[in-house]
């Protein structure tokens, strides 16, 4: 008998009665859309309208569709929750995020606070709805059933990186695309600069994106047996590093540097023999060595002709105060670094609101409403872990840390598959991208233009495949 729900007709439940392979294709397409739709959205905002309010809309379209398809799989019994322990942590994080929001509704007699907590701060849009969308992307990504699907997602991520790198180069040259990070305010003493932000809405956020894209590109360039893919990935990795230097932020240096260190470690621990017959670069070691040399050359050339400048504090205040007007004015005599300020403000808010935080995306609102915090207020901790604790509480941070630990354990276990079969390079690619992102998160912030990609990669770390057919079908 055909499956139905709530006693409705068979026609209205067509998705429950789809062939298993058809549902799998829909899921794969939706996960690819989680990368493509935000990319198209960034182009739309850049060229058609300057209204960044659309940022959240593009995320909701994919994130809540992912939640729907995850539920559909449960109803069809294609998956069971007991197979995905990480799902229970996600449910806990979602409940705590909702509790943090309702704390705002109860405690603040301000419609502005309530709206911000659910939709996010102006220009950021990372309120409760965005958090739920992230969680939905993670949940659906866990259910990927084909190795080829994971590789396709990584291909699209690298492709999105290529598009953003082109934008970043154009933003960096004087006659390039319009950019919000040219000629930064005199108070910050940074005239005649041309910082790249790609389509990530900030040079710092772009650095976070480059970390994810580089994690996939470096591993693919080193281990993929296809000459074309390896060359494209290698050239992309070089372009990502180059445009990372154009951001004047420490984030891409830390993120890409971490990805490169992980790649070296993976190669050192690899014991199986991988040879690319008939090619000049006949081994992964040689490919990796060439990539490192290219990185050194790029760094030397940029250092010689432009110089390497780190301006994260100036970027943050240009973004939050001069561009979005959501934080208090920076003090011209404040000598603390961006991360010192972020930590100081975060710990103060955590101390006052340890359980549920100040509310989703309300860090700026709370500070500018207080005389003792208005000057040098900041809308992000620029340490994602402190930011979670400050806005959603210490329990949320604990669950997030537990999720990361479980995910990395899962990824390290998955490395056995790669070490037994070098063609399964997507396992180390996921590990490199997710781990490097988690390291740079100590110096950066989550953003709707980047975070969906991280949640997608972290979710795919939980994929399980049948070794013979490359698909998973739960045994009844």
Image (spheres, rainbow, N blue to C red):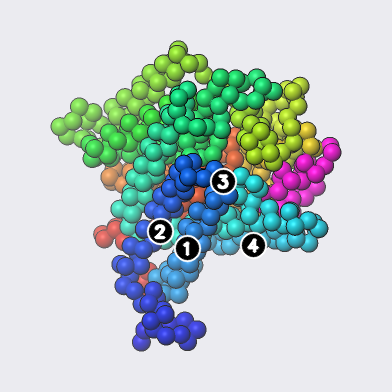
Residue 171 is situated, as x and y percent measured from the top left of the image, at 47, 29
Give residue 371's quadrant in the image. top right
> Which residue is under mark 4?
95
- Relative to the observer, which residue lies in front, 320 or 357? 320
Image depth: mark 3 or mark 1 in front: 3
Image depth: mark 4 or mark 1 in front: 1
Give residue 227's quadrant in the image. top left
> Which residue is under mark 2?
30
Give neighbour class at mark 2: few <14, some 14-19, many 20+ (Cα, 10 Å).
many
Q: Secondary structure at mark 3?
A: loop
Q: Secondary structure at mark 2?
A: helix
Q: Which residues are drawn in magenta? A: 348-372
Residue drawn at (47%, 57%), measured in percent from left and top? 62
Residue drawn at (50%, 84%), measured in percent from left and top? 6
Q: Secondary structure at mark 4?
A: helix
Residue 182 is situated, as x and y percent measured from the top left of the image, at 55, 26
Q: Is residue 457 left or right of residue 387?
A: left
Residue 4 is situated, as x and y percent measured from the top left of the image, at 43, 82
Q: Do residues under tags 2 and 1 come within 8 Å of each other at their CB atoms?
A: yes
Q: Which label belongs to residue 52?
A: 3
Residue drawn at (68%, 35%), measured in percent from left and top? 321
């Amino acid at each position: 008998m055909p499956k139905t729900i709530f006693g409705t007709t068979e026609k209205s439940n067509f998705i429950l009665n789809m062939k298993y392979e058809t549902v799998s294709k829909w899921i794969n397409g939706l996960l690819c859309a989680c990368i493509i739709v935000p990319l198209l959205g960034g182009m739309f905002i850049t060229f058609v309208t300057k209204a960044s309010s659309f940022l959240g809309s593009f995320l909701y379209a994919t994130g809540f569709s992912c939640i729907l398809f995850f539920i559909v799989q449960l109803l069809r019994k294609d998956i069971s929750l007991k197979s995905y322990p990480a799902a229970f942590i996600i449910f806990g994080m979602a409940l705590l995020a909702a509790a943090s929001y309702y704390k705002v509704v109860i405690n603040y007699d301000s419609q502005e606070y309530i709206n911000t907590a659910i939709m996010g701060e102006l220009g950021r849009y990372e309120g409760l709805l965005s958090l739920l969308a992230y969680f939905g992307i993670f949940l659906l990504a866990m259910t990927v059933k084909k190795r080829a699907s994971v590789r396709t997602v990584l291909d699209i991520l690298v492709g999105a990186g290529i598009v953003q790198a082109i934008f970043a180069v154009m933003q960096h040259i004087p006659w390039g695309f319009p950019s919000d990070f040219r000629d930064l305010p005199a108070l910050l003493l940074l005239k005649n600069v041309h910082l790249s932000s790609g389509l990530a809405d900030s040079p710092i956020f772009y650095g976070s994106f480059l970390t994810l894209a580089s994690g996939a590109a470096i591993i693919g360039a080193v281990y993929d047996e296809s000459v074309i893919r390896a060359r494209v990935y290698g050239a992309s990795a070089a372009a990502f590093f180059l445009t990372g230097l154009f951001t004047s932020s420490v984030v891409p240096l830390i993120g890409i540097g971490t990805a490169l260190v992980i790649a070296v470690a993976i190669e050192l621990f690899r014991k199986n023999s991988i040879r690319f017959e008939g090619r000049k670069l006949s081994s992964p070691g040689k490919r990796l060595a060439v990539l490192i040399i290219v990185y050194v050359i790029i760094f030397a050339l940029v250092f010689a002709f432009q110089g390497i400048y780190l301006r994260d504090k100036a970027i943050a205040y240009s973004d939050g105060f001069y561009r979005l007007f959501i934080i208090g004015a920076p003090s011209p005599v404040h000598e603390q670094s961006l991360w010192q300020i972020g930590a100081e403000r975060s710990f103060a808010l955590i101390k006052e609101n340890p359980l549920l935080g100040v509310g989703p995306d309300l860090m700026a609102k709370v500070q500018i409403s207080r005389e003792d915090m208005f000057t040098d207020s900041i809308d992000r901790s620029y340490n994602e872990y402190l930011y979670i604790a400050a806005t959603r509480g210490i329990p949320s941070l604990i669950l997030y840390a537990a999720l990361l630990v479980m995910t990395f354990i899962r990824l390290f276990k998955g490395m056995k598959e790669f070490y037994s079969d070098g063609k399964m390079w997507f396992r180390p690619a996921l590990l490199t991208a997710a781990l490097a992102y988690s390291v740079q998160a100590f110096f950066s912030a989550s953003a709707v233009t980047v975070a969906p990609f991280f949640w997608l990669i972290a979710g795919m770390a939980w994929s399980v495949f049948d070794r013979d057919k490359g698909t998973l079908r739960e045994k009844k």
